[in-house]
Amino acid sequence: MTQQEKTRERLKKLIIESLNLEGMTPEMIENDAPLFGDGLGLDSVDALELVVALEKEFSIRIEGEETTREAFASVSAMAAFIDGLNE
Amino acid sequence: MKVVITGIGAVSGFGWGVEKLWRGLESGATSIREPSVFDVEGQRTTLVAEVGPPGPDAQAEIDDLRNLSRADVFAVIAAREALVRAGVDAGGPRTGVFCGGSTAGMAECEDFVGRIVGVHPGKPTLRLLASQQLNGPGDAVARDIGACGPVIGFSSACASGAMALGAALEAVRSGDVDMALAGGADSLCRLTYSGFNALRSVDPGVCRPFRRDRQGLSLGEGAGMLVLEPLDRAVARGAEPLAELAGYGASCDAHHMTAPHPEGDGALAAMKAALMDAGLESLDVGAVNAHGTGTPHNDQSESCALRRLLGERSLEVPLTAPKGALGHVLGAAGALEAVASVLALECGTIFPTAGSTPADPDFGIDLVLDEGREMFRGKQTWISTNFAFGGANAALVIRGLV
């Protein structure tokens, strides 16, 4: 498993856990599906919740609207963003 | 201008939907029972009218609303049902939402705090905290149906639902909106549950409105939503009006934090104002859908106000009170009870006041019991009342259509 794959798995678990997505499993979340709107159907309150969870889990700081928008597009984008920060 | 009710939707202790509400009311049964939503051990009463899980189809519809609080979900589901009944697909730029409530997402907020301090399991998610806003259910309805007219929340304790309907009536009459979704929603929460228990306002058993041995109310939860529009507009678009919302009146006792005025001064003023608003007199009242909380104070004061309004006719005008069946749904009470009045007018049956004993003879009222009662079809005039802690009173006049 590559670093990106590991991060993606960790993220999927975190999303389900932090957002209380009952009945969902990591396999049900596609790497490139949009997290917000039509994809997973998350909204701005979920986004806020995710920022808090990600900062804690990965010991990072997420700042800037543009960065966040790009990084939160999908699980793949989020993993690339986090691994980029930790490189 | 005549304003008519063209759609109704309900969520109650009897279940999801208007049909379950009516079957329950008509049967004389109660939906008040042991709850599952939270721990009620050690309180004066353990009984509430809780909304149970719906069938599988409806459950899927509710699962899609995961971003909403329980009270929001009640409101949205009731509003959707009301729109379907009215034959309307969606709201629009001239549709307003008027929603009563007393605690909205308080239950979720309590969970949030409980999780922080470690007395409830799970993570204190922001979603739970964000549910807290009192305007939540009305906003959720507006978003769901795409209503872009005014969206207003009403919170005057137990009179909220009726007040929302009163304001909606005024907005339709004045032409501010072409259509209104009006009603109320409340879910059970620890705050109101413990509060009413601490006040000893709850009956340890099932609430028994207007009975001599009554000991208080039973709490409930749910929502009622109604579609209001001008009669001519409803007819023009081919809708079938269910009833007319003919008048609304409100007042305040300005008397006490919790107790009503002993002779029902404020209640009487609200009922008189509603009849005047409808262009009617007390002689026109065909039936009463009473507030009837089952507390010693309310039922005494309310029956006194009714005797003052109706005079000798108080023993001839049938009176029914749904809180022995539905519990007291607080901010949604006026709305859910208005839906019940519409159903009664539509079916030609005055549903019975749940409970097995006759009315307190001192009250001088004609309490409908057992099997309910047939009523003359056609132009029946119902007065539906709601009186709140704090002294806010509201009355609605609802008439059958010929």
Image (cartoon, coloured by chain):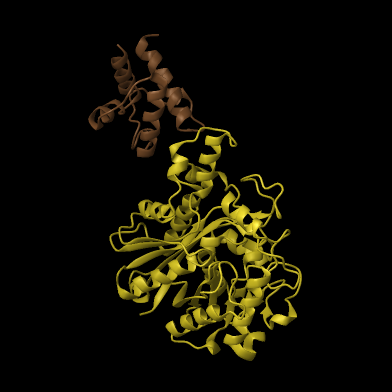
**What residue is rendered at 36% in x and 10% in y?**
A3
Chain A colour as displayed: brown
Quarter where residue A58 is shown:
top left
User: In the figure, the yellow chain has which letter?
Assistant: B
**What residue is rendered at 70% in x and 71% in y?**
B371
Quarter where residue A73 is shown:
top left
Q: Closest to the observer: B346 or B10?
A: B10
Q: Closest to the observer: B185 or B398?
A: B185
How far across and down, in percent of the image, does residue B360 sit?
A: 73, 77
> Viewed as shown, does residue B61 lie left or right of B148?
right
How far across and down, in percent of the image, does residue B209 sit?
A: 67, 70
How far across and down, in percent of the image, does residue B33 sit?
A: 69, 54
- Whether residue B189 is visible here, answered yes or no, is no
User: Relative to residue B317, is residue B60 depicted above or below?
Assistant: above
Q: Closest to the observer: B5 or B140?
A: B140
Q: How many marks?
A: 0
